[in-house]
Amino acid sequence: MGVPKFFRYMSERYPCLSELVKDYQIPEFDNLYLDMNGIIHNCSHPNDDDPHFRITEETIVKNIFHYLEVLFQMIQPQKLFFMAIDGVAPRAKMNQQRGRRFRSAHTAAEQMKQAISRGETLPSEERFDSNCITPGTPFMVRLQSELEYFVADKMSNDPLWTKVQVILSGHQVPGEGEHKIMDYIRYMKSRPGYNPHTRHCLYGLDADLIMLGLCTHEPYFSLLREEVKFGRKSKKETSVDETQFYLLHLSLMRDYLGLEFQELKETLPFEYDLESIIDDWVNFVYYLFIILT
């Protein structure tokens, strides 16, 4: 679930949170987690407004592989590489997804009708239907098989991949990708001998990953995402090699929230606890979002 305009709000309120990735000169991370559905959508239909755009399934798979290689090379995790694809979601989320997919199909059909009415000649090939990026579809079954082969090949032949634990949680595993990642982080924290100074990096496009990352209460946690240009929407096809990436440091955001609420230390009738403050702040943001929508 996304929170509209929240990432923009946080970026404007705390501009020092985001760091531009330049020449892969970034802090060292132990674990890298990928919310894969954003990558799949980027590689299969980068421009939904163009009814002329066509892409083959082979090209989609190659683009996904290249995207994974770029992200892995950029972060170079030292211990864990976790890739999570959305599985079957809870019923309430499924109803929301169903409505979204009906609207997507209707919009695509209307765009093609308008293009034909303007006298434009559309390609004879079938347009890629983004609704097939759904758990259990033949496309996702084929993609899962290709990803398993890709991971096995990289772990056998790439020295950077051989030194880390690689986990691929596919569409057949229930739960949305970001929540499967959070479940795994909680599982690691519950194990004896867990290092509380583990450095986490999570790639994803949803703004609610900010809240999910804060709720882990991990002191070293960053979000990786593509550059977001605020203002008028302008969609264009851009390869991952030409894309600018930003790191949003949740560890710094924890400090900002601590400064925001430090006045409470003198007024609370009980002990001030930053972790409880963060939980209350996250709950307040979601309650406010529900009220406003």
Image (spheres, rainbow, N blue to C red):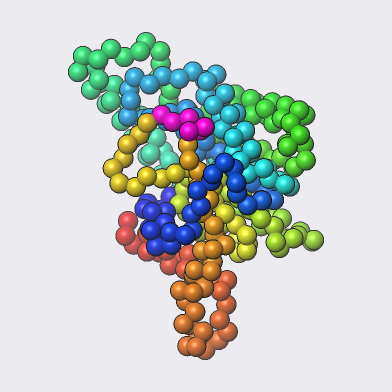
Q: Is residue 265 above or below residue 9?
A: below
Residue sitting at the far left: 118
Percent of width and height locating residue 75: 63, 44
Residue sitting at the far right: 193
Front position in the image: 248 or 109: 248
Percent of width and height locating residue 282: 48, 64
Q: Residue at x 43, y 41 (%)?
A: 97
Q: Which residue is drawn at 59% across and 43% down?
A: 24
- Image quadrant in which you'd find residue 58: top right
Percent of width and height locating residue 53: 38, 21
> Does 213 lie within the magenta span?
no
Q: Which range is magenta?
A: 237-242
Q: In this orientation, does residue 260 appear?
A: yes
Left/right placement of residue 139 relative to residue 4 reads: right
Left/right placement of residue 62 relative to residue 6 reads: right
Label tally? 0
Q: Is residue 57 above or below residue 167?
A: above
Q: Residue at x 48, y 82 (%)?
A: 264
Left/right placement of residue 167 relative to residue 85 reads: right
Q: Residue at x 71, y 40 (%)?
A: 166
- Image quadrant in which you'd find residue 171: top right
The quarter of the image holding the C terminus is bottom left
Percent of width and height locating residue 82: 66, 43
Front position in the image: 218 or 190: 218
Q: In this orientation, does residue 176 appear?
A: no
- Image quadrant in which you'd find residue 254: bottom right
Left/right placement of residue 10 relative to residue 246 reads: left
